[in-house]
Image (spheres, helix red, strand yellow):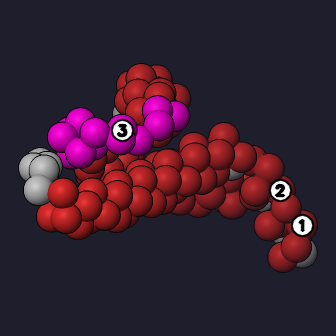
Amino acid sequence: MGFDAWLSAVEPEIEKVKSLLALPLNDNPVALCEDLRRIDAWQGRLTTLFSESGEYLEMAMSLRLSDLPDLKALDKEIRLKAATSRERKIYNLLHGLSRAASSRIMLGMSLLKASKEEQNITGKQGC
């Protein structure tokens, strides 16, 4: 499968993750647990997509590098980055989404811990 076909196949997933990350974290501990389960599941998928996008970027760089004549190293690097900008953009996007999902999970876990401590004080139950 080429990069364009792969990208078309995974774009709905990328948009789904973007929409999940755009939602605020829930204040209700039970709902927050569900939110964290959902984003954790997507975190695994993001890792796979990030890895796949890295492969496409490397393949594109290798292919484009053979197209470059005898240029100085800096000129090759500049042209190579320009020639692989689409692949690099998706690679960077997936890297950012993966980091954002990880941060959201850590924040959510901190909120749950604080909620649990509050529940221990007040006697309420959480997830």
For image coordinates 18% across by 40% down, the residue present is 30
Q: Which residue is mark 3?
A: 26
User: Which residue is found at the position 49% from the left and 48% from the top?
Assistant: 97
Residue 111, position as x, y percentages in the image:
34, 58
* Element type where label 1 sits in the image: helix
Amino acid type indicated by mark 3 = Asn
User: Which residue is situated farthest in the bottom direction here?
Assistant: 73
Circle 2: element type: helix
Placement of 14 over or under 67, stated as above or below: above
Q: CA distance from mark 2 to mark 1?
A: 6 Å
Percent of width and height locating residue 51: 39, 56
Residue name at image x 82 percent, y 66 percent: 76
Residue for badge 2:
79
Q: Secondary structure at mark 3?
A: loop
Confirm or deny contact between disc 3 and disc 1 (CB under 8 A): no
Which amino acid type is marked by label 2?
Arg
Residue 75: mark: 1
Quarter of the image for residue 28 reads top left
Amino acid type at image mark 1: Asp
Horizontal relation, residue 82 to residue 58: left or right = right
Marks 3 and 1 sit apart, C-alpha to C-alpha, by 50 Å
Q: Nearer the viewer, residue 12 or 122?
A: 122
Is residue 46 depicted above or below 35 in this figure?
Answer: below
For disc 2, the neighbor class at 10 Å (few under 14, some 14 to 19, many from 20) is: some
Q: Give the image location of residue 8, x and y in percent.
A: 46, 23
In the rendered view of the protein, which quadrant contains the N terminus? top left
Residue 28 magenta: yes
Pointer 2 and pointer 1: residues touching (CB < 8 Å)? yes
Residue at screen point 42% across, 23% down: 12
Residues 77 and 34: in front is 34
- Nearer the observer, 96 or 59: 96
